[in-house]
Image (cartoon, rainbow, N blue to C red):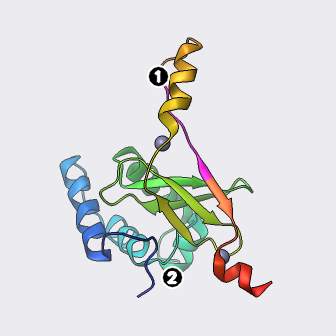
Amino acid sequence: MLGIMSAEESEDVRVAISKKRISDSGLRMTAARRQLIEILAESERPLSVDDLSQRSKGKFDLVTIYRNLEVFREVGIVEVILLENGRNLFVLTGEHDHSHHIVCRHCLKTERIEFCMGGELERYASSRGFSNLSHTIEVFGECPECEAKH
Ligand SMILES: [Zn+2]
Ligand SMILES: [Zn+2]
């Protein structure tokens, strides 16, 4: 099977971790939440709200999808990947709390980067008197398969 990322947990493990975080947060596992988690877990790449709408066969309206993704983000089940064109993609975090990704700008194939270099940037921001820091870093490029097609 095509894994979404190298060295990634299996689909079942990511579903189980996500469900546990929902219940640990005292939230109800609704049909919509269960299905959205399963669609994200089985996807070969991060998904947009439109992708989720299509893959759920229009069962949930966009507002329902947006609201649940927001809940997922708050409890740490999904991470948002902001694309170069301003669109958001959503990916299950699995057992990772914080990641950066390499994203193919053609096919949206995504790999998790196994380290974070944001600490240095945050130390710099801190030295400039900023507090309550966070950071978002994604790397965009052309994957080997897309590159071979050109
Ligand atoms: Zn590609
Ligand atoms: Zn980081």
- Please, what secondary structure does the residue beneath circle 1 have? loop
Q: Residue 73: x and y, percent? A: 42, 49
Q: Overall secondary structure of the magenta stretch?
A: loop
Q: Residue 87: x and y, percent? A: 67, 57
Q: Nearer the viewer, residue 137 or 30?
A: 137
Q: Residue 64: x and y, percent? A: 47, 60
| Residue that extends furthest to the right in the rendered view of this protein | 150
Q: Residue at x 62, y 71 (%)?
A: 108
Q: Earlier in the sequence, mark 1 or mark 2?
A: 2
Dot 2 surroundings within 10 Å: few (below 14), some, or many (20 or more)? few
44 vs 32, left or right, is: right
**Amino acid type assigned to the residue bearing label 1 in the image:** Asn
| Above or below 63: residue 7 | below
**Amino acid type assigned to the residue bearing label 2 in the image:** Lys
Measured Cα–Cα span from mark 1 to mark 2? 40 Å
Quadrant in which the C terminus is drawn: bottom right
Check if residue 137 falls in the magenta segment.
Answer: yes
- Please, what secondary structure does the residue beneath circle 2 have? loop
| Above or below 61: residue 66 | above
Magenta span of residues: 133-138
Check if residue 18 falls in the magenta segment.
Answer: no
Q: Nearer the viewer, residue 90 or 9?
A: 9
Q: Residue 1: x and y, percent? A: 40, 88
Q: CB of residue at label 2: within 8 Å of ligand 1? A: no
Q: Disc 1 or disc 2, which is closer to the eye?
A: 1
Q: Which corner quadrant of the image does residue 28 belong to?
A: bottom left
Dot 1 surroundings within 10 Å: few (below 14), some, or many (20 or more)? few
Kindly check if marks 1 and 2 are in contact, taking CB atoms under 8 A apart as contact: no
Q: Which residue is mark 1?
A: 132
40 vs 58, left or right, is: left
Q: Which residue is mark 2?
A: 57
